[in-house]
Image (cartoon, rainbow, N blue to C red):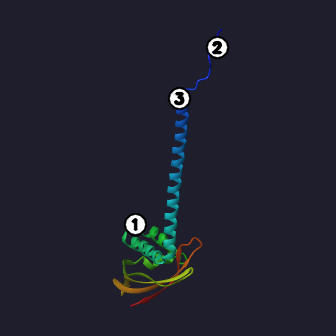
């Protein structure tokens, strides 16, 4: 009797390969899960930042002041900083903003912005600033320093960001 060789090959190496493939798949799935969780965390952080800005209209006024100060203090960046500041006060044309601060030599925040009132998508914020401007008096350039109390009216836009819609200035 002649026996034919068997072609079945049931070695432990085959089960190891299957096990390794399954382990690799589990690792990939875990990695995807970790990446997904990181994306979720990042989204939450962005949402917190947006919420924080929405909840706090003073941050808009502070950012507005930041660009005003940069425009005045940094040489060569006046126009670009005034354009950036205008994004926080869209109802005021850039040219009007520039003309209002062109002769300003110094701009200092005396009292940080504080919320006077806030309801739904409207808010009022007050702050005190000191401004030194060069003005022509009797044909001479003279520096005039004024302390101003400024009340800003803000509205939340469709993106949930606060924008300045108007202001009133009281000279002290």
The first of marks 3 and 2 along the sequence is: 2
Q: Is residue 34 left or right of residue 140?
A: right
Which quarter of the picture shows residue 120?
bottom right
Relative height, residue 100 to residue 30 (above, below): below
Quadrant housing the C terminus? bottom left
Q: Nearer the viewer, residue 1 or 114?
A: 1
The first of marks 1 and 2 along the sequence is: 2
x 53%, y 73%: residue: 161
Instruction: Name the residue beneath numbered marker 1.
Output: 76
Q: Position of residue 75 (x, y in %)?
A: 37, 68
Q: Residue furthest front?
A: 1
Q: Nearer the viewer, residue 145 or 14?
A: 14
Q: Position of residue 134 (x, y in %)?
A: 36, 81
Instruction: Point out which mark residue 4 bears.
Output: 2
Look at the numbered disc 3 and give the secondary structure of its residue: helix
x 37%, y 68%: residue: 74
The first of marks 1 and 3 along the sequence is: 3
Q: How many marks?
A: 3
Quadrant housing the N terminus? top right
How many C-alpha atoms fall within 10 Å of the one at disc 1: few (<14), some, or many (≥20)?
A: few
**Which label sits in the foreground, 1 or 3?**
3
Instruction: Name the residue beneath numbered marker 3.
Output: 12
How many C-alpha atoms fall within 10 Å of the one at disc 2: few (<14), some, or many (≥20)?
A: few
Label 1, label 2: how far apart the Cα atoms are: 92 Å
Q: Residue furthest right?
A: 1
Q: Is residue 110 left or right of residue 118?
A: left
Q: Nearer the viewer, residue 27 or 89?
A: 27
């Amino acid at each position: 009797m002649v026996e034919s060789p068997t072609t079945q090959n049931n070695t432990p190496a085959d089960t190891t390969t299957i096990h390794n493939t399954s382990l690799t798949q589990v690792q990939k799935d875990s990695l995807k899960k970790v990446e997904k969780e990181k994306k979720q965390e990042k989204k939450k952080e962005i949402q917190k930042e947006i919420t924080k800005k929405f909840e706090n209209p003073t941050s808009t006024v502070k950012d507005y002041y930041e660009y005003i100060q940069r425009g005045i203090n940094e040489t060569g960046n006046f126009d670009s900083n005034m354009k950036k500041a205008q994004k926080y006060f869209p109802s005021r044309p850039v040219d009007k903003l520039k003309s209002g601060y062109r002769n300003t030599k110094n701009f200092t925040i005396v009292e940080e912005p504080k919320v006077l009132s806030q309801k739904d998508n409207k808010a009022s914020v007050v702050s005190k600033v000191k401004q030194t401007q060069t003005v022509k008096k009797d044909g001479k350039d003279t520096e005039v320093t004024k302390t101003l109390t400024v009340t800003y009216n803000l509205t939340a836009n469709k993106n949930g960001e606060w924008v300045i819609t108007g202001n009133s200035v009281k000279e002290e």
